[in-house]
Image: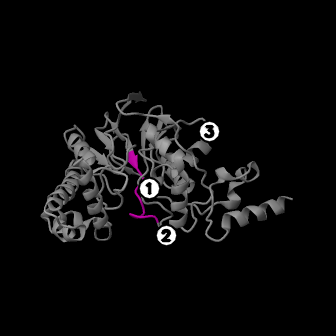
Amino acid sequence: MRAMKRRIFLKSALGAGAGLVGLSALSPLYASEPDEFKGPDVPDIDAVKVSEHCYYVPALGSHPTPENFGMFSNPGFVVTNEGVVVIDTGSSVQIGEMVLRQIRKVTSLPVVKVINTHYHGDHWLGNHAFVAENPKLALYAHPSCEKVLKNGQDKFWFDFMQSNTNNKITGTVITVPDKHFKGGEVFKLGGVEFKIHHFGRVHTQSDLAIEVTTDKTMYMGDMVMRRVANMADGSYRGSIKALSEIEKMPINHFIPMHGHHEAVQLIKDGRQFMETIYNKAGEYYEEGLSDFEMKPKIMAEPFMKKVASQWSGYESTIGKFIVIAIQEYEKSLF
């Protein structure tokens, strides 16, 4: 009977076009034996120390591939005297486990809180590893993050990561955050003060930025990055407004979840990128130009030629960014 159940499982999970499913969909028999169906471990990546308490584990690439195990964003963690706060957990249980190993190189204190900055899968699918270590661990995100994931984006992102990594995230259990930060919360832990920011729709509707006020360091999620990848869930006007506010804050270090940490120039360049595309798209829209006529003109702008053109995904994705800018500009007219 056990062998028969295994054959039935494998047929349903590996059938043509079906892809693999998360272990959360399996019976207790298989959920208790994840190693039988688990993808490979992710090689260790040493954490980067940014300030006294703040670290992140740098990505292996700018997009998920089988070669980088889907490790294309930067999980972060903050070490306090009473425990560790993790900010984003990566694309899989394997990445989460690797991040835990890097935390253990820095401290033996437990992880006491996980915060997911938004609902894209490379920021929360690693939650499984942390809950496996401590089933009572609280997982926080903006309320809209949990809502979006439970409306089907959880499975979408699992399948997306499986497809792009050639099933290397197998064994990951979909583990959705169910505790909420709405923005404006301030808490202290082990001598370190945190402030949670929500600026509305920026990269997504659920973006949180986590300011470690003690260190003058801010984890930015995907609200800013030197990468051109995904604007479909975001807002240009929301991004410009948020980055303009952040630019004025007394922050020394900004940690994006894609790319290296920087000072305030990262925020300035991110704002100028959004302003250039949105404002020029609006200007050319009023002149009656089509999207394909706008594209070379926008790409010829000095900032785009000198700065943005160096970013990953620029050539392949800038056209999609322009289309979304036109759509947002049109909506602003009504």
Image point 22% across, 37% down: which residue? 250
Under mark 3, the amino acid is Pro
Of the 4 image quadrants, the one containing the N terminus is bottom right
Under mark 2, the amino acid is Glu
- Foreground label between 3 and 1: 3
- Foreground label between 2 and 1: 2
Within 10 Å of disc 3 (Cα), the crowding (few <14, some 14-19, many 20+) is few
Q: Is residue 127 visible?
A: yes
Circles 2 and 1 in contact, beta carbons < 8 Å: no
The residue beneath circle 3 is 135
Under mark 1, the amino acid is Asp
Image point 26% across, 57% down: which residue? 325
**Mark 1 residue element:** loop
The residue beneath circle 2 is 67
**Separation of residues labelled 2 and 1 (CA atoms):** 18 Å
**Separation of residues labelled 3 and 2 (CA atoms):** 31 Å
Residue 197, image quadrant: top left
Pick the residue in front: 240 or 256.
Answer: 240
Circles 3 and 1 in contact, beta carbons < 8 Å: no
**Mark 2 residue element:** loop
Residue 46 tag number: 1
What's the magenta region? 55-64
Within 10 Å of disc 2 (Cα), the crowding (few <14, some 14-19, many 20+) is few
Asked if 307 appears above or below 97 in the picture, the reply is below
Of the residues under marks 3 and 2, which one precedes in the sequence? Answer: 2
